Amino acid sequence: MMGTWQEGPGPAHQRLSDRLRLLILDGRLSLGAALPSERDLAAVLGTSRTTVGAAYRTLVEHGYLATRARARATVRLPQGTPPEPPASRDSMTIDLSFAAPPAPVEILHAAFSAALERLPRHFERHGYDRYGTAELREAVADWYQRRGLPTAPDHIMITSGAQHALGLLARTLLAPRDKVLIDHPTYPHAIRTFTDAHARLLPVAVGASGWDATQLQAAGRDAQLAYLIPDFHNPTGMCMSASVRHRLRLACPTIIDETMTELALDGAKPEPFAAHMPTAVSVGSVSKSVWGGLRIGWIRAFPSLLQRLEKARPATDLGTPVVEQLATAVLLNERQTERPDALRQLRSQRDALRQALTEQLPDLHAPQPAGGVTLWATFREPISSRLAAIAPDYGVTIAAGPRFGIGGAFERHIRLPYTLPSSQLTEAVRRLTQAQLALNQGATGTHGPAPVA
């Protein structure tokens, strides 16, 4: 959790107190948790007890630790009102923590109108269908067929979004202390899902050149489950090459997240991963290709696994809402998840964001992603969490890099979505530039992490 706290400006005790404060604000050190003694923490970190003592005293003075005689310091939050934001702050904060497209109003309206016309066919049934409606299971199977992957409706289970699908799979397939192979970085809610299942995470880096099949296969031999995002990876936007897909054969069950697969901005859409690894369990949704508010997802797997999921499902829900399923079936059957106009808009916004970064934050390196909805940008210094804590004071919220990794990694990174209009993205970069300048001049922030999607 401490990561590379030794790096950065200022004395060691200040860097240490800053890191601990950010861990508290980020929720990774929970309220009421007891910190190690000065002696123990100094020994583990390889620093002096004087440094740790000074860091602890700073946190006590600012209200982040509580102390009692003959007891370890415990985590708390400062009392009182938050500091006043700078006078120059605009009234409306630009939210860059959510990577989600706006709703296509006319398309959604037509889909729900058609769904309401079909709804009476279901009135004689109880409406609790753990597998999903026949209409949507057939539509999802046809969607895979069009992508070149033979699929029958009995290989499909409908869920309340991709996150629900992942949680259901984790509860069914994992036991406490099982090891889960993950991309690194990866989707923050996937990390939370697996840690809530008391699994141990095995991160394999997604580097500048993509995925390393040899490393993945080596880690897969020691894992009980793998979770990969090969199609326009979140957060980097990279797409796994065809050569890696052909060679990759993991020894453990593998979950493939396909929520971004429709969002190819440069080149063709990737072929389904399960075409090369038939045992792969595919998870999809319409949250990124249509709208996040349409909470419909699915699992493609062998019927034997779906039967296990069906038995486990009542512990959390009894089925997915019928009207939303019928509307999604209309969208899939009419190929409204494949919208060239939306892709052109995303491409234009991506280019506008990169141009604004080049002009206003030239030291921030942001490679062009092949698809998806986010840039994965890199600073020269490890300032990501500190910048996220101060950025709302300047009218913008961001998702700091460590949210997408484990062990305090990615302090040099931030995820920047390009789902907002180009003018808002340019203004957001201007505000982010102001926040970084304030940070460089010694300012600090007190904002906790924003929700991420």
Image (cartoon, rainbow, N blue to C red):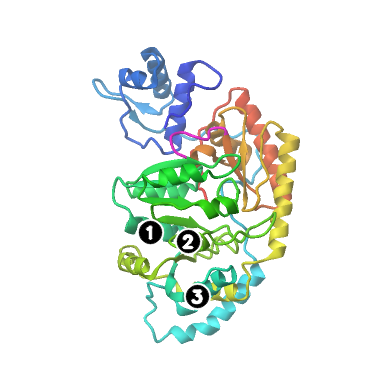
- Mark 2 to mark 3 CA distance (whole Å): 15 Å
Residue 331: quadrant of the picture:
bottom right
Tell me the mark number nearer the camera, choosing from 2 and 3. Answer: 2
Residue 169, above or below 396: below
Amino acid type at mark 3: Leu
Check residue 283 in the rendering and tell me which mark sits there, or answer none. Answer: 2
Mark 1 secondary-structure assignment:
helix
Q: Nearer the viewer, residue 63 or 353?
A: 353
Name the N-terminal-most of marks 2 and 3. 3
Q: Amino acid at mark 1?
A: Leu
Q: Are marks 2 and 1 in contact (CB under 8 Å)?
A: yes
Residue 406: x and y in percent read 44, 38
Q: Is residue 282 left or right of residue 361?
A: left
- The residue indicated by pointer 3 is 136
Q: Residues within 10 Å of mark 3 (few under 14, many from 20)?
A: many
Q: CA distance from mark 3 to mark 1?
A: 20 Å
Q: Is residue 258 above or below residue 352?
A: below
Name the image quarter holding the N terminus: top left
Q: Is residue 132 left or right of residue 286?
A: left
Query: Magenta segment: does it hold 273?
Result: no
Give x and y (percent) for residue 134.
46, 79
235 w.r.t. 433: above or below: below
Place of residue 235 in the rendered image (x, y in percent of width and height, measured from the top left): 56, 46
Mark closest to the chain's N terminus, 3 or 1: 3
Magenta highlight range? 405-412
SS at circle 3: helix
Nearer to the camera, 151 or 349:
151
Say which of 122 and 44 sits in front: 44
Q: Which mark is residue 370?
A: none
